[in-house]
Amino acid sequence: MHHSAERSLSTYLTGFALAVVLTAIPFALVWGGLLTGPAVYVVIAVAAVIQVVVHLVFFLHMNFKSTPGENLFFLGFAAVLICIMVGGSLWIMMDLHHRMM
Amino acid sequence: MSETALNSELLEHEEKKSLESREFGFWVYLMTDAVIFALLFASYVVLSKNSAAGPTSRDLFDLGHTAGETALLLLSSLTFGLATIAMTSDQAGRVVQWLFVTLILGLGFLAMEMLEFHGMIAQGAGPGTSGFLSAFFTLVGTHGLHVAFGAIGICVVIGQVLVKGLTLPVRSRLVRLGLFWHFLDIVWIGIFSVVYLPGVM
């Protein structure tokens, strides 16, 4: 009991430290103007995606062993739905924007 | 005697099962909420350049302020985690303490957001000014509203831990509220990465 509590404290602290680093990188880049152009967007996007995964694993305790399969299934389903709806909307609107120019 | 013991064991088993299915239901709700936020993000990205000759994101956003909000929300995620750990080791007093710290951090976040919105509206950059600002206030405001409901939830759970103690249903509520709170922090990652950081470049 005590051991598992200790382990989950270190889990939260690891997640927190990773989240701080992954937040500091994009903020520092934008604040200091260290990078310009599309590279900044790539760094921001990659840091954000990694941080979402960090939160899912270290704070929401998602994994392939103890998390029920239905929960993972719904997470995947939501991800697919989001990709179709957000990707589709942006595709259509950017195309429209391009043709209206 | 042994029959009542068996019955209470059965009851507890049933209760655990029903609470597990509630946790799954709450997870499904969170996923639908994620879809709502994703579509609000898409609307914001489409409208973010339509400032209608009014103030643009570069004039309005203050990265220091956003960093402060991010720090408060991230810390509150950690303190909620500490409350969950206290729950697993049956320390009701600790649970209440950490939930209280989480509540203060959450309210601090809301106060900073209110200050930001108030400042923008006072500058004439309210939600009615342009498409960009409508989308901004809808997206960030929806997140703020969720945080406000989470804060109410924390007050309720603090009250329940104090009155009822760490019973099985109270533990389950604490776990579900934790899912909600951590989920809001995930949405905030999206907000600073999509709205604030590209907005000031």
Image (cartoon, rainbow, N blue to C red):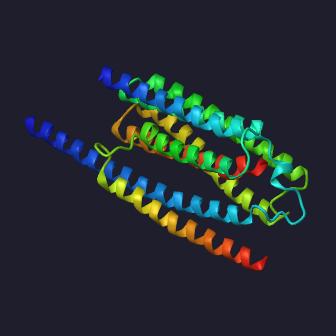
Q: How many marks?
A: 0
Q: Nearer the viewer, residue B3 or A85?
A: A85
In the figure, is residue B4 to the left or right of A35? left
In the figure, is residue B173 to the left or right of A67? right
Which residue sits furthest bottom?
A: A99
Q: Is residue B121 above or below residue A82?
A: above
Q: Is residue A2 above or below residue A18?
A: above
Q: Position of residue A11 (x, y in %)?
A: 42, 29
Residue that appears at 32% across and 53% down: B21
Residue that appears at 46% across and 38% down: A59
Q: Position of residue B66 (x, y in %)?
A: 72, 40
Residue that appears at 63% across and 33% down: B105
Q: Quadrant of the N terminus of chain B?
A: top left
In the figure, is residue B46 to the left or right of B15? right
Q: Specify whether residue B144 is in view.
A: no
Q: Nearer the viewer, residue A77 or B17?
A: A77
Quadrant location of residue B138?
bottom right
Q: Position of residue A90 (x, y in %)?
A: 63, 68
Which residue sits furthest left?
A: B2
In the figure, is residue B87 to the left or right of B103? left
Q: Is residue B141 above or below residue B129?
A: above
Q: Is residue B190 above or below residue B76?
A: below
Q: Position of residue B102 (x, y in %)?
A: 57, 32
Q: Specify whether residue A81 is in view.
A: yes
